[in-house]
Amino acid sequence: MNGRQTMKAKPSPHPPFADTSPMRRRDFLFVATGTAAAVGAALASWPFIDQMNPSADVRAFAVVDVDLAPVAVGQRITVKWQGKPIFIAHRTAEEIARAERDDTAQLRDPARDDERVQRKEWLVVIGICTHLGCVPQGQRPGSLRGEWGGWFCSCHGSVYDTAGRIRKGPAPKNLYLPPYRFVTPTHLRLGEEA
Ligand code: FES
């Protein structure tokens, strides 16, 4: 059994996913080849894992591989991981600078930008508002992003910045970070720690 199959998923630190936003199936960009390969590998390994009597969280664990090569600077994509929308933003230089500038701002849930990214140009967050679980807007070009240029949750008006930090509204926490690592500069693997 390799390390990838034995990794344990962290207990979910966020409220249940309440799909009360207008997000539809087409909002998800499934990176089909990588995702299918990863899920297929996980399924193929099942009999061996089962034989080892893994804990429930290991059985529920899955990895999703994402090919970042086609994602242009400034583009945001959504992939599904463990039933949750994962927002991946290929940040522009301006978005990065804006996030770093606000490291010293008064933040409700203080975190530096470099604590929230592994590579400056890629922000990877769980796309679920930390207030009551709606899916914020801001993924599609032209959608509302709020005054900090990140994401806007129209359920009750929470606004997140380009680091996914909560800046305004009732949400108590920044958008949560999923476990992930870069296998290569353009190959992201969700579900594994760096
Ligand atoms: Fe997002 Fe309430 S669920 S602001």
Image (spheres, rainbow, N blue to C red):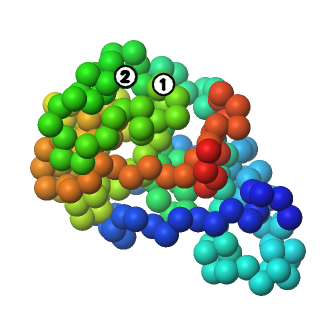
Q: In which image quadrant can residue 51 be found?
A: bottom right
Q: Is residue 78 above or below residue 46?
A: above
Q: Residue at x 22, y 60 (%)?
A: 131
Quadrant the C terminus occupies: top right
Q: Is residue 172 left or right of residue 93?
A: left
Q: Where does the image place residue 163, in percent across and percent down from the top left?
A: 34, 35
Q: Residue at x 66, y 56 (%)?
A: 63
State whether residue 104 appears in this view: yes
Q: Where does the image place residue 33, in percent across and percent down from the top left?
A: 72, 44
Whether ligand 1 has any atom under 8 Å from the Cβ at mark 1 is answered as no
Q: Nearer the viewer, residue 81 or 27?
A: 81
Q: Nearer the viewer, residue 194 or 98?
A: 194
**Mark 2 burial class by Cα count in 10 Å: few <14, some 14-19, many 20+:** some
**Mark 1 burial class by Cα count in 10 Å: few <14, some 14-19, many 20+:** some
Residue picked out by circle 2 = 96
Q: Secondary structure at mark 2?
A: helix
Q: Where does the image place residue 23, in percent across and percent down from the top left?
A: 36, 53
Quadrant the N terminus occupies: bottom right
Q: Nearer the viewer, residue 89 or 112?
A: 112
Q: Is residue 135 above or below residue 133?
A: above
Mark 2 and mark 1 residues within 8 Å of each other at the beta carbon:
yes
Q: Three-letter amino acid code at disc 1?
A: Glu
Q: Is residue 126 above or below residue 101?
A: below
Q: Three-letter amino acid code at disc 2?
A: Ile
Mark found first going from the N terminus, 2 or 1: 2
Q: In which image quadrant can residue 99 be found?
A: top left
Q: Residue at x 19, y 35 (%)?
A: 146
Residue picked out by circle 1 = 121
Q: Residue at x 28, y 58 (%)?
A: 130
Q: Secondary structure at mark 1?
A: loop
